[in-house]
């Protein structure tokens, strides 16, 4: 680990005087010396988090003291990231239904497809149009939208998931490098459903969003909420940290800063209510607790009540961005 990173177990503040630059954001072998959302240099190492899915390795999670933005320090370089998705359990890519978490995931996904569809139609004000789904995975959402009259292009890095979506649902799915070939001003809606937190260069992707959206187009970004009631409760055992696959841990405040510095405006924020129960159950399962589903449901219910069902404490949030000014 680079020596600039605060020593393990410490809660000390990390301040550096190294020059800032865009390169600091695309992180893999680099240490961030500035908050990627607000550029503050007052950074603390919050805790270590275990990768429960693939490697068993622990990764430090940093937090900006100024805006609350979090990120995973010392992640694998992007060229090696694929191996951290190699688990058979990474079901958004493999589509199997064996364990409890698979079952919950698929149950939630069925429910969520209808909800996502409604969000797209509501925020765009359109019944059909051109939709670009970034991180389209096995293509379920893309197929759902295609059936309802939308023209859909998917972008997916995982070869087998992408090919599956093409074969099974006839999705126009492409690899990330092909984003450059999508015409400017062509998409009415661009969606990132639990994807932006995985991207090594989220700012670069937002740049492409600004180029590809029509003037009236909307970008919909769903992500875990690092300032949620369940994040506070589970701390370094919060399953939505999902290191090192999740590189960024946004809060509403940090995300507003992150996008406003890049010419976007957060028009609306909505909660994804089911994620609280799914993430709580998964957090217990990762700790090998008995009856994780039951525990997750109970804890989720109590946390929702305790937080007064406030949107800004919801486990996952959907941000609606208006096109670049
Ligand atoms: Zn910050």
Image (spheres, rainbow, N blue to C red):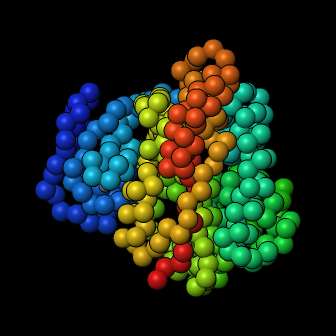
Q: Is residue 197 visible?
A: yes
Q: Is residue 215 left or right of residue 153?
A: left
Q: Residue at x 49, y 67 (%)?
A: 266
Q: Residue at x 46, y 83 (%)?
A: 325
Q: Is residue 302 left or right of residue 1?
A: right
Most foreground residue, 226 or 166: 226
Q: Quadrant location of ligand 1? A: bottom left
The spot of residue 323 in percent (x, y) is: 53, 78
Q: Residue at x 28, y 38 (%)?
A: 45
The spot of residue 91 in percent (x, y) is: 69, 40
The spot of residue 180 in percent (x, y) is: 55, 76
Figure quadrant of the N terminus: top left
Most foreground residue, 93 or 187: 187
Q: Is residue 63 left or right of residue 247?
A: left
Compared to 249, does 284 lie above or below?
A: above
Q: Is residue 79 visible?
A: no
The spot of residue 96 in percent (x, y) is: 77, 37
Residue placed furthest toward the top: 290
């Amino acid at each position: 680990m680079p020596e600039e990173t605060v020593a393990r177990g410490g809660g000390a503040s990390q301040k550096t005087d190294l020059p800032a630059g865009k390169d600091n954001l695309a992180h893999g072998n680099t240490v961030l010396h500035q908050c990627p959302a607000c550029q503050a240099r007052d950074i603390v190492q919050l805790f270590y988090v275990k990768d429960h899915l693939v490697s068993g390795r622990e990764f430090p999670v940093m937090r900006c003291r100024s805006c609350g933005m979090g990120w995973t320090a010392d992640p694998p370089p992007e060229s090696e990231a694929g191996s951290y998705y190699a688990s058979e359990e990474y079901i958004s890519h493999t589509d199997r239904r064996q364990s409890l978490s698979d079952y919950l995931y698929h149950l939630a996904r069925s429910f969520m497809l209808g909800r996502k569809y409604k969000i797209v139609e509501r925020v765009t004000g359109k019944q059909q149009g051109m939709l670009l789904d970034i991180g389209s995975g096995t293509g379920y959402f893309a197929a759902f939208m295609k059936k309802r009259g939308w023209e859909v292009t998917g972008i997916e890095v995982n070869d087998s998931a992408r090919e599956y979506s093409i074969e099974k649902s006839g999705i126009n799915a492409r690899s990330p490098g092909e984003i450059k070939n999508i015409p400017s001003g062509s998409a009415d809606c661009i969606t990132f459903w639990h994807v932006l937190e995985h991207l090594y260069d989220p700012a670069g992707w937002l740049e492409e969003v600004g180029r590809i959206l029509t003037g009236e187009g909307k970008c919909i970004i769903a992500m875990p909420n690092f300032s949620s009631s369940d994040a506070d409760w589970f701390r370094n055992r919060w399953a939505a940290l999902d290191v090192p696959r999740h590189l960024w841990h946004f809060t509403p405040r940090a995300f507003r800063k992150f996008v406003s510095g890049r010419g976007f405006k957060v028009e609306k924020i909505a909660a994804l209510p089911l994620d609280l129960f799914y993430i709580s159950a998964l957090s217990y399962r990762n700790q090998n607790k008995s009856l994780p589903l039951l525990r997750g449901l109970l804890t989720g219910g109590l946390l929702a009540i305790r937080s007064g069902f406030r949107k800004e404490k919801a486990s996952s949030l959907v941000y609606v961005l208006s096109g670049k000014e």
